[in-house]
Image: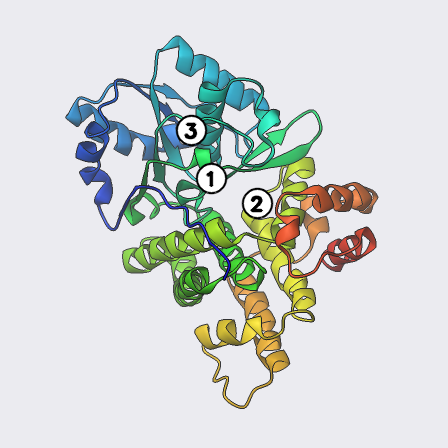
Amino acid sequence: MSTHVYYVPSINIMGKGCLKEIAPYIQELNLQKALVVTDKFLMQSGTSGKLLAVLDEAGIEYVIYDEVKPNPTCKNVHDGVDFLKSHNCDYLISIGGGSPQDTAKAIGIVATNGGHIAEYEGVHKSKNKSLPIVAVNTTAGTSSEVTINYVITDEERKVKMVMVDKNSIATISVNDPELMVDKPAALTAATGMDALTHAIEALVTPGAYPVTDATALAAVELIFGNLARTVKNGHDIEAREQMVYAIFLGGLAFNNAGLGYVHAMAHQLGGVYDLPHGVCNAMLLPFVEEENAKYVPEKFRAIAKAIGLQVDGKTDKECADFVIESIKALSKEVGIPAKLSELGVEEVDLDLLSENAMKDACAPGNPFIPTKEEVIALFRKIL
């Protein structure tokens, strides 16, 4: 019998209005000064201000680092480390989507381990646990607030470095749907499809096991039932709350089962073209899963059932076809672009994109390992 290790933050706070309840949990950590990691947009829009008001009311001391880019870079990380040290901060509070969350993890790892962030690319490369992190999420989503994964762009190599590191996991995760109601429809769609990709890749990977299957299937059902609602009406708080539960469940699934070639390929599009990660995942997902279904068709039966197919009497292939067509339909409904060429991707870069995808930390988690020519062919399907 194989052994599984299940990683999850120590404390997870979620539900409508939960942001207002987090101060006592932070104070229980008995720390002195926080580095709040966020971005300019969230500061200007007032989203970060909602967190700062809670901290101010509780008398929690902090300084703000708001230089995070949508695809955070090595410079973002090391500037953040310098800022943290110069202000004598002993923990981090991240607020935002995956970009601030990933940046905070990277800052926390470098702060306790030293060196350059590129040294931690790969699986469990650090020796020391990160500084404590309170991860306040604002999108549904990357699930970075509950995972051991983070992604940083090496701006010199134009590569998205994937770090899978048990030492980077947050101490406290916070998922309040009220922080998400004003998010643009396009961002809601992209992050929601990112969450669906997490759940489906976690289900088809060889690393899946009954515990991860259970949370991933629940996430798939919730996303198909609520994503389109949140895209059409961002103030539908009930649908937003269901998406919060979905990203939490899906995050726990892929955090412990792994991902695959959708993410391996999407990371390269982000690294070379600075494209939104969720959009890239959404475009690639049905085509990669179409190939995966040739190798593990039985995995798609439970997914089909979760999204509404009466599977009795259906073949595994019929179930897989239903899942793939349902993904395409949902992507279209929420406004995901159909072709990479619409986003500026060029044929000349497919060789580099494919070569780097094969080196990505997520690649080994796929049900089959494609050749470079097969990866290029997958990119071409949506070019």
**SS of the residue under disc 2:** helix
**Please, what is the three-letter code of the amino acid marked with disc 3?**
Lys
Q: Which residue is mark 3?
A: 129
Distance between mark 3 and mark 1 Cα atoms: 20 Å
Residue 370 place in picture, x, y as percent: 75, 56
Q: Nearer the viewer, mark 3 or mark 1?
A: 3
Element on which disc 1 rests: helix
Q: Quadrant of residue 39?
A: top left
Residue 345 shows up from this direction: no
Would you say the residues marked 3 and 2 are in contact, meaning their CB atoms lie under 8 Å apart? no
Q: Which mark identifies residue 98?
A: 1
Q: Nearer the viewer, residue 244 or 371?
A: 371
Under circle 3, the secondary element is loop
The CA distance from mark 3 to mark 2 is: 27 Å
Which residue, as the protein is rendered here, is positioned at the far front? 1
Q: Residue at x 27, y 32 (%)?
A: 51
Q: Earlier in the sequence, mark 2 or mark 1?
A: 1
Residue 49 rendering spot, x and y as whole percentages:
29, 29
Percent coordinates x, y for residue 134 in the rendering: 33, 33
Q: Confirm or deny contact between disc 2 and disc 1 (CB under 8 A).
A: yes
